[in-house]
Image (spheres, rainbow, N blue to C red):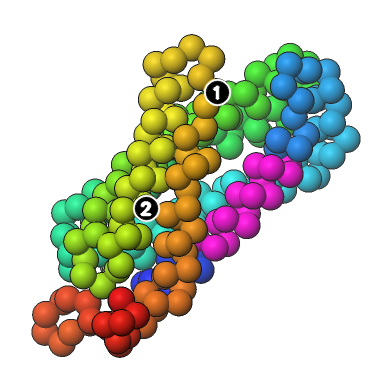
Amino acid sequence: MGRASLVAGIALLLMTLLAGFANFVAIEGLTTPGDAAKTARDIAGSETMFRWGVAAFVLVAVLDVIVAGALLALFEPVDRRLSELAAWFRIAYAAVLLVAAAQLVIALDLLDDPGQVLRAVESFTTIWHLGLLFFACHLLLIGYLGYRSGFMPRVIGILLVLAGLGYLGDGLGLLLVRNYSFNIALFTFVGEVVLIFWLLISGRRLTERPGTGEAASVMSPAVK
């Protein structure tokens, strides 16, 4: 279980770095909302960086699958069915992210048509944000499993549930509210950050009680 925790923590940390570069530097950094001509010109002028951004998103999707498997191994002793469901939700999110990233590849083939380029980038954002509904369900389940686990501090489970509710609210807002622009997840993502640190620092110390399939921790009760 400690190995699963370490794998999940490392993968999540890599995902954070890759997604940060891909979204804020390579994609948003080259996109000017409402200005198709400038967007197409900036992408054409920094095409290599844009392509690296697309590649980073593909790697993020691959890492999502790895994280899904690692968290399944970690929480399976708590509730196998819910752990499997949580894993499938994350895999579904990864699949949607790949579909979204394909819109960015399409944008590269349309650089001579600025209007189509901007629409393709906007489609990427819309598809990705809708995919976060699957991610929200994943976080809600992982938060619940963490709360029940007995080896993860319950406050982390609560924070993950709040993060899931944030993504769920944003996804539903995008579907149900015209020109939805609020970002609830911006205020609730702290649970994801705390989870990474716990997986890398405390979770990796978990061991399995012989013959029980349950997690035991080498930490003292005070640390828990």
Residue 204 screen position, x and y as percent: 39, 78
- Looking at the image, which residue sits at the far front? 222
Q: In the figure, is residue 166 to the left or right of 151? A: right
State the image quarter where residue 205 is shown. Answer: bottom left
Please rate how many residues cluster around mark 1, counting C-alpha atoms within 10 Å: few if below 14, some from 14 to 19, many from 20: few
**Marks 2 and 1 in Cβ contact (< 8 Å):** no
Does the segment drawn in magenta span residue 87? no
Q: In the figure, is residue 19 to the left or right of 38? A: left
Q: What is the number of the mark on residue 159?
A: 2
Residue 178 screen position, x and y as percent: 48, 12
Mark 2: amino acid: Leu
Who is closer to the viewer here, 44 or 210? 210
Q: In the figure, is residue 148 to the left or right of 22? A: left
Identify the residue at image location x=17%, y=64%.
Answer: 78
The residue pinned by badge 1 equals: 181
Which residues make up the magenta segment? 12-26
Who is closer to the viewer here, 199 or 163? 163
Comes first in the chain, label 2 or label 1: 2
Relative to 170, say whether 156 is above or below: below
Identify the residue at image location x=18%, y=84%.
Answer: 209
Relative to 181, say whether 98 is above or below: below
Relative to 205, say whether 167 is above or below: above
Please rate how many residues cluster around mark 2, counting C-alpha atoms within 10 Å: few if below 14, some from 14 to 19, many from 20: many
Mark 1: amino acid: Ser
Residue 126 screen position, x and y as percent: 53, 26
Q: Classify mark 2: helix, strand or loop.
A: helix
Which quarter shows the N terminus?
Answer: bottom left
Identify the residue at image location x=37%, y=53%.
Answer: 159
Q: Main secondary structure of the magenta part?
A: helix
Identify the residue at image location x=30%, y=76%.
Answer: 224
Relative to 23, say whether 67 is above or below: below
Q: CA distance from mark 2 to mark 1?
A: 23 Å
